[in-house]
Image (cartoon, rainbow, N blue to C red):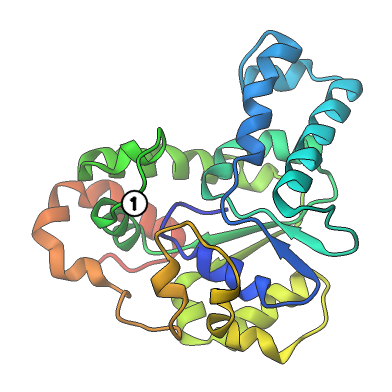
Amino acid sequence: VGFPRSGTTMVENILAAHSACITTDERPFTQNLVRALPGLTALDYPHALDLLDDGQCRVLRRQYWDDVRAFTGAAPGRRLLIDKQPMNMAYIGLLTRLFPGARIIVVIRDPRDVCLSCFMQAFTPNQAMSNFTTLPATVALYDRLMTFWQGVRAAIPLPLHEVRYDDAVADLEGAARGLVSFLGLDWEDDILRFNERVGDRYIQTPSYEAVSRPVYTSALERWRHYEEAIRPHREVLDRHARTLGYPTD
């Protein structure tokens, strides 16, 4: 998980290059479960969480894996499923309830770069991406989601590993080895050539061109070229930047 344009596609493709992983390229598996909650509990998310019993959790898990099989053509088997969907941050309560054996990978990037990139990106129109049509709306969504995330992060009962986009760009092998170790996998040298294998998979996200090239640093601190545009939002963005450990001078 991670806010859109944080580097989640890069992380997904690093793991897709490992023979023990299967990836999904932002499929709405979890969103489908959220839509099913009112039919089970008569309440929407997150209010439905308090009413879910074990039987209803089994129904939702079965629906999830049925959706996965419909997409992949088979069950993951012994491979690890990497369900990359940035906005799943908002549904972390449901995921921890349904999948107590899961591991969470969170991708972090400078809030100023993230919001600028989301605003400048030509996303395929949908309900979530409609928030990125203006910079104020983009910053407002970032503020809501990341404030929520910082509020619940310490209470998440699952193993959690953070990947900082900046660190991954500076030391790809170090970041990749950290991911592999966190997932309990053995190292494979093909991981560092993940961009050469992107063409073997269909990628529908706007990051396709970026991840099909070797890792590059030109997107770091890109916001500095647009300081006037983001100036009205610096108070909010700098607050999140400080929380995440980014300088604000």
Q: Is residue 72 positioned above or below 200 on the image? A: above
Q: Position of residue 169 (x, y in %)?
A: 46, 81
Q: Nearer the viewer, residue 149 or 66?
A: 66
- Quadrant containing the C terminus in the rendered view: bottom left
- Residue at horizontal 73%, vertical 77%? 18
Q: Position of residue 138 (x, y in %)?
A: 29, 43
Which residue is labeled 1 in the image? 239
**Residue 163 found in image quarter:** bottom right
Q: Position of residue 32 (x, y in %)?
A: 64, 31
Secondary structure category for the residue under label 1: helix
Total numbered labels placed on residues in the image: 1
Residue pushed farthest top?
A: 42
Q: Nearer the viewer, residue 236 or 120?
A: 120
Residue pushed farthest bottom?
A: 189
- Residue at horizontal 88%, vertical 29%? 58
- Residue at horizontal 22%, vertical 66%? 223
